[in-house]
Image (cartoon, rainbow, N blue to C red):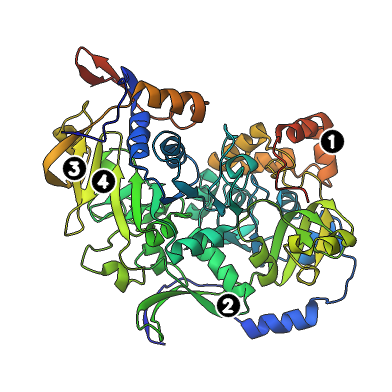
Amino acid sequence: MNVLAEGAAPYLKVDPDGFREHVRDHKSRALEPKLTSAQDAVARFVADGDYLVYDCNYLQRGPSVLIREVIRQQKRDLWLCGKFTYVDVGLLVGAGCATKVDCGFFYQGGAIDRALDEGRLEIYEYSNVVMTHRLKAGAMGLPFLPVRSFGGTDGFEHSGAKLVEDPYTGQATVIVPALNPDVALIHVHQADQYGNARVFGTGIAHVESALASRKVVLTAEEIIDTDEFRRDPGRTSIPYYAVDAVVHAPFGAYPGTCGGYYGSDTGHVIESFAAVARDGVANYVEKWIAPFANEREMIDKLVGEEKLAQLQANESIHEGYRA
Amino acid sequence: MTMLDVPGAKAASFNEREMQIVLVARMIEEGRTYWVAGGGSPMYTILLGKRLYAPNAQYITEDGVIAPEPMLPFEPIMTMVASRPAYQALAWGTMNTAGEHAQLGFMDYGLLNCLQIDKHGNLNSTAVRQADGKLRHFGGPGGADTIAAACWRTIVMTDQEQRKFVERVDFISSPGFLDGTPNARERAGLPRATGPWRVVTPWAMYDYDDERRLRLIAVAPFVTVDDVLAECECAPQIADHVDTLAVPTEHELEVLRGQLDVQGQTTGVRSGWVVLEGDKYVRQAG
């Protein structure tokens, strides 16, 4: 293929055969129980230096419990898939966990500004859809995918994309490198103990992220019986063999919303924006994360059952969510 | 000539954000699809347009919501991957759903905002060049790159400010006509016959001339062409005849304020007021 132009940024190594071998050697095809705690899942499956993708974000059906656990365990040198996200990148960078970001969109504030000034953060440029197409290529077992966007932008110059002459049409076409993250953190509505999972409502790239990633940790609002999946297989979003760990995490997206289950905690949402905006992540961590061994303790101490019940009551829409 | 006029009593006072939303709402066409940037002015624009002028216009958002009947109001920030904005959609997908449907040609219009735009309609929401010549990162295109690349036509909503209308954006996050040469978009791999179509600020409306340059075609009755040009770092082309944009009607404001943006999350933000004094609309100081 004739390469007409290419971006100059580093990108996670593309290695579809290596990924297949990882699947062969490390992904169990047996129906094995995978239930564990957030603490154990992050300790075992998130390593320093990993490329980490989370689906949705801290405020919208994201794996917020796991993001907090990554910060609590002081993981280091993570490379983030920063698409469709507000405060997550700022929290992880501000807490010293992340040093590289592929940018689709994230909320930038003082925490990230300072990391850039101090040379602690590299940003590579993409867009939201380009990142989800990179994940899609990774989830298809392919080395790259063509996209009909991104060409001509300055983001292209600061990315791992290439402009090639498409061998079929002869037209200039942008291709983007497949993304196979080291680890995916995904919050789902329902899962069974083996990792079969249902996501209700819309999402960003939960299926692609689960299939494309070497290690996959799910948090689930509800753990349900495997027979429920067998009764309605069309509603399975993610099959068990993609998944390495399942954490039962009611209110796992807190302070974000989880469609059909609960609304967001607006006060906490604003507090998280303020932490990133004003470079106050250390204070945020000191208040919401560091003092507690786990989420249960944090919820008991700082949120309370009454508040959770209120957030649940605030979600008046259930159509389309629970099976 | 008055442009985009509609029947009904004209409002005696309104804010500039409302002016902008109302103008674009009147442009919404029956039977067309809009990919609407999540949140802010574009969302309330499509909702107002559907409510008053084009009930059979449909829209999608970046998280793959297709043709919703959203339940208002939204919680702050919760305009995507949340139940209210996604309510009673015809289909729920994901981000690749939106991207691919646009790639296929199903999206007639993209409706988005931006922080900086240049004379060829390129958009910047990523980085600004500082005095020392270095680029300062501040965000990212989000879905706007795909909206601007793959929808048939793009409508941009932004503010009339000098630093926003420039010769060449500091960083092209989302493509306009690129360097403005014929077929520049196709040469960069973008689908043919797509691109920028209109730019609407609270003060003015622009299209593009035959050489793909931004062109002023209408101004609000409370500003002059010179006022608009004073708020453009790079002067646009000017149409032979510059029309006057019709102000909001009482009914449009009633619906926008009372039924749609009831908490003033968008219409109450960063916007001056305009009032009728005698027979003239006048901007209030500040």
Location of the C terminus of chain B by quadrant is top left
Tell me the residue at 57%/74% (across/down): A137
Of tags 3 and 2, the one toward the viewer is: 3
Marks 4 and 2, how far apart at CA: 39 Å
Of circles 4 and 1, the one toward us is 4
Q: Nearer the viewer, residue B151 or B199?
A: B151
Considering every residue shown, the one lying at the far top of the view is B278
Q: Which residue is mark 3?
A: B217
Q: Quadrant of residue B6?
A: top left
**At 63% across and 55% down in the image, what residue appears?**
A203
Residue A224's quadrant in the figure? bottom right
Residue on which disc 1 sits: A300
Q: Chain of mark 3?
A: B
- Measured in 3D between alpha carbons, the distance from the residue under mark 3 to the one under mark 2, in whole angstroms, is 49 Å
Query: Could you say whether the residue bearing mark 3 is in a helix, strand or loop?
Result: strand
Of the numbered discs in the image, which one, if any, rests on residue A13?
Answer: 2
